[in-house]
Image (cartoon, rainbow, N blue to C red):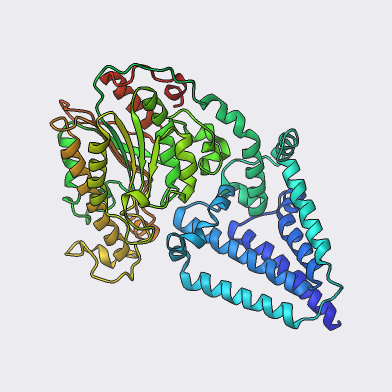
Amino acid sequence: MTADAARFMIGVAAALAGWLIPRAVARARIETLAAVGLDLAPALLTAVLISLACGRALFAGAVVLALGSGFALADATKRAVLREPVVFSDMSELGHVFTHPHLYLPFAGPAVVIGGALAAAGLAVGLLIFTPPLWSPHPLAAFAAALLVGGGWWFVSREPWLGRAAELLRRLQPSGEPGADAARLGPFAALLVHGVIARAERDQRRAPYRPLPAPALQVTRALSPVVVVQCESFFDARRVSPQVPQDLLPGFDACRARGAIYGRMEIPAWGANTMRAEFAVLTGIGEARLGYDRFNPYHAFARAPLASLARCLRANGYRTLCLHPYDRRFFRRDLTMPALGFDAFLGCEELGGSARPPYLSDLEFGRRLVRILDEAGPATFIFAITMGNHGPWPDHAPGPAPLAGGCGLGDLPQGRALLRYLHGLKASDEMLALLLDELGPQRRDALLRFYGDHQPSLPAAFGHLGFADWASDYILLDGPSARAQRIDLPVHRLHSMILDRLCRRGVIVDPQPAALGAA
């Protein structure tokens, strides 16, 4: 075998490895040739275009191998940390890896990610410089071919071809569950199938939730504030283990003692994907009605105006504010919050706080929320998204692990991270106690809803303790009540519960049918 033939074969083998490694992570099997061909297509197309551009099969194979290995690492990490594989809408978060690396790299290991990227880049540059081409490079032809492929994709993504492509892909019989489809169709095929079908179905699924024209109202009644707080990773962690201090959440216990409605919430995510709970509470749309857009409603579904809690309250005389002490562009909330009916969206630029740890503490955020409410007046709806207890909670963080005194949790796998999380949870509970005091019937007589968006990503600690529950917790305070009431429900039902309480109060005199019927 000649040196040129050897380089060609090694390049082909490297490209195949770049395709097979992600399949190994997904435990993909071969069921149909159509699925295998669709799964192979991205790797094959990438290798062909690069080979055409530079004439070096070995370089092209190395690039495909590096890309495939990076995808496999991301997929394996997400499965371990968040209990689900990479999904098509994760592509919209790819840029966050570079703009907000502290939210992503610690889970995969910064040394692995950065070291692997540098090694791959160095190898690729070396192959490009020091290996001779096997044939004449044609970069213009490769560029023209890439434009042709991109134009074809744009053409197919428009009706009527989009619907026809989706119908063709449905013949592969995807289940809609990303893990199962990645195993049966292959990870790349599953991404393509889910992405195309989601786009084809989106307008039809969105149509029932478009907002109705809001009539002009003469508001003559007194309005009381409505405050909904989505608290990062909040849940009653005392149910994880008897070792968790039972006096951890005095604010939560005080709310129940005052006759709150409370309970556990079914959350369609674990460890992250805040936007799923957030969107469900604001719109009341259950994940079954979102189809493939349920993985990230903010990816595309919520970019158009939708009936929502904010829009309904605005139609009834309220000013609607969203508060989040972080980068407003994260999850593209800067686009979705106006579409969901908020008059203003205040991020870290207005609220203070940092886009990097340490974040604005929940207690301080609660104080700023109260000040904003005082300035805005009682006819205000505030939807607040906390950031203070956001992970990761690294074991190696400097300083003594909080809550370590005698509870024995620090010696568990991820034990120090669990203790740091519990310390943050206690701070979140202090915020709840503050809001209970400041917004109660003796002061501002607000309707207060406080809930956790999901459980924290602590798989090793929870696995060691045998805790497999996905539910978070919520509290609803609406003036004095005779006794506490526990109601467990799926997260999207919180929307209708809030609207029901507002109707009983007489706050809402013209609820939009689309908003009320969304659940």
Q: Quadrant of residue 42?
A: bottom right
* Residue 34 appearing in the image: yes
Which one is in front, 372 or 184? 372
Which one is in front, 145 or 182? 145
Reply above or below: 450 against 17: above
Point out residue 111 in the picture as x, y percentages from the top left corner. Answer: 48, 73
Q: In which quarter of the image is residue 41?
A: bottom right
Point out residue 221 in the picture as x, y percentages from the top left corner. Answer: 26, 18
Looking at the rendered image, the quarter that the C terminus falls into is: top left
Reply above or below: 502 against 62: above
User: Which residue is located at x 75 percent, y 74 percent?
Assistant: 58
User: Which residue is located at x 58 percent, y 60 percent?
Assistant: 25
Point out residue 369 in the picture as x, y percentages from the top left corner. Answer: 26, 43
Q: Quadrant of residue 205?
A: top right
How many numbered markers are drawn? 0
323 vs 399, left or right, is right
Reply above or below: 90 against 416: above
463 vs 262, left or right, is right
Looking at the rendered image, the quarter that the N terminus falls into is: bottom right
* Residue 268 appearing in the image: no
Which one is in front, 396 or 408? 396
Which one is in front, 350 or 500? 350
Point out residue 313 in the picture as x, y percentages from the top left corner. Answer: 36, 26
